[in-house]
Amino acid sequence: MDTRCDYSELIVPNDASYVRIARSYVDEIAKKTGFDDKARSDLGAAVTEAVANVVEHAYEPAERATIVISCERVPLGLKIAVRDKGIPFDATRDPACEAPVESGREVAPGCGIVAMKEFMDEVHFNNLGLEGKETVLIKYLHDRDITDYYAACELEPYVSHASAEPLHQEPIEFTVRSMLPSDAVEVSRCAYRAYGYTHTSESIYYPDRIVRLNESGLWHSVVAVTRDGDIAGHGVVMKHHEQARIAELALGAVKPEYRSHGVFLHLTDFLIRQAMAQRLIGVYAQAVTVHPYSQMTLHRFGFSDCAILLGFVPATARFKAIKEHLTQRETLAMAFRYLGEPWAAPAYVPPHHLSMIERLYAGAGARADIRSASEGTTVEAEESRLRIAVVSRMGHARIEVEAYGQDIVARVKATLRDLCLKHVDVIHLHLDLSDPPTSRYVQEFEGMGFFFAGILPGEMAGDALILQYLNNVPLDYDKIKIDSDTGRELLEYVKAHDPNRA
């Protein structure tokens, strides 16, 4: 039994009367996958030409043989492969095609390959040696949420036979530049090869969204391109809202065949310079702790650890760039870097965390403007204002206190209870340190089971204090690998305040 996801095959004789049957089979799969009528028409026309080409050109007139048509879901849509063991065919030489190729119209003789390339997003012709040859047709589900169609299957990346090369041993030449709209599909593929389908930013799996986010200014995507025009890696300067003063360096990925060539270092350097050009006050990034290498890269560029996010990523996640098997929910180390003179926002720090927070500021090269709650004059409204975001497939939620009201304790407690009943595993509470009530209410929140995670300068009106809550999440601190002295001190502090260890 084939173990690929949503995979099926149809085997037909090399008989022209079966071309229509092959087209009907693919149309039903396309309908099940979620393609609209226009896309299904394009798929049908391309499959018709691919199968007809085999029937007409691959075998002698009286030769009896079979053709295998397979359909398979891939990260961006549907892959159809037409395989045969007939006469090899040089598909790189496009025949002259004078007639126009239009969707929904009959394809003129000699225009089959042109039609396939016109109707499909990708067309590959692969020689399989003793196994014959195949025509691979790929159609994207443009701007569709892949999770609508995948409940039980794990997505698999499509790797063309032609690209299944060994790792590059010799130095490679590449340039780093801003992404072009035409790069978006390859960027999405590159991310999948690095993260599987586990990244919290779902938009990276949709080329159309990547283009729109770059056009909006919220993303600035950067790619490393080889001399041959292949995208070796990418990363993003990601602002989480239009008025953001800081950005996340995110979605860094390098294709396996280009690793160990300095691609990620050059990408990181370019991203930081792009963030500086946007006049942001700082940037941050989140590194895995199953190994220390990505943390080491950040520290090399002047980042300082500022928060430890316990159990942020599900243990079931399969990071394709990480060989280590996750035996528990993966912890992330958050690191921050100021891009200029550190700003001095007032920080109403809860007294029992003062010493640790001062050390985190010092690690980032800043001297915080620490104030006591009695110095602030904030009038609390009757009702609090919370912003809540839940990423169900990651088992994670974030509560952000936008405004304190007299009902803040009850509101946070009710929200926490609701999230726990929904089996959300990890819950973060973001509090604005420039708002005086933060200092007063932290112990109330800690009484609910929240505990210290760290800080993120510039995230809110002022700097953010991050508290975390683990909803029955088993965690072995000895499996968390931290690179820096500041990070290790912070991890011990977090561990000491974790109420789940009592």
Image: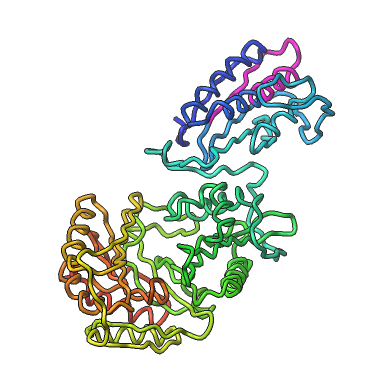
How many marks the image carries: the answer is 0
> Is the C terminus in the top left, top right, bottom left or bottom right quadrant?
bottom left
Comparing 176 with 274, the one in front is: 274
Q: Is residue 229 visible?
A: yes
Q: Is residue 472 visible?
A: no
Q: Residue visible at 69% across and 21% down?
A: 105
Magenta range: 47-71
Residue 141 percent across, percent down from the top left:
53, 37
Comparing 376 with 127, the one in front is: 376
Residue 39 percent across, percent down from the top left:
58, 30
- Check if residue 215 falls in the magenta segment: no
Residue 146 percent across, percent down from the top left:
46, 41
Check the image and tell me how it is coloured: rainbow
Q: Is residue 205 above or below residue 312?
A: above
Q: Is residue 324 above or below residue 456?
A: above
Rendered image quadrant of residue 370 = bottom left
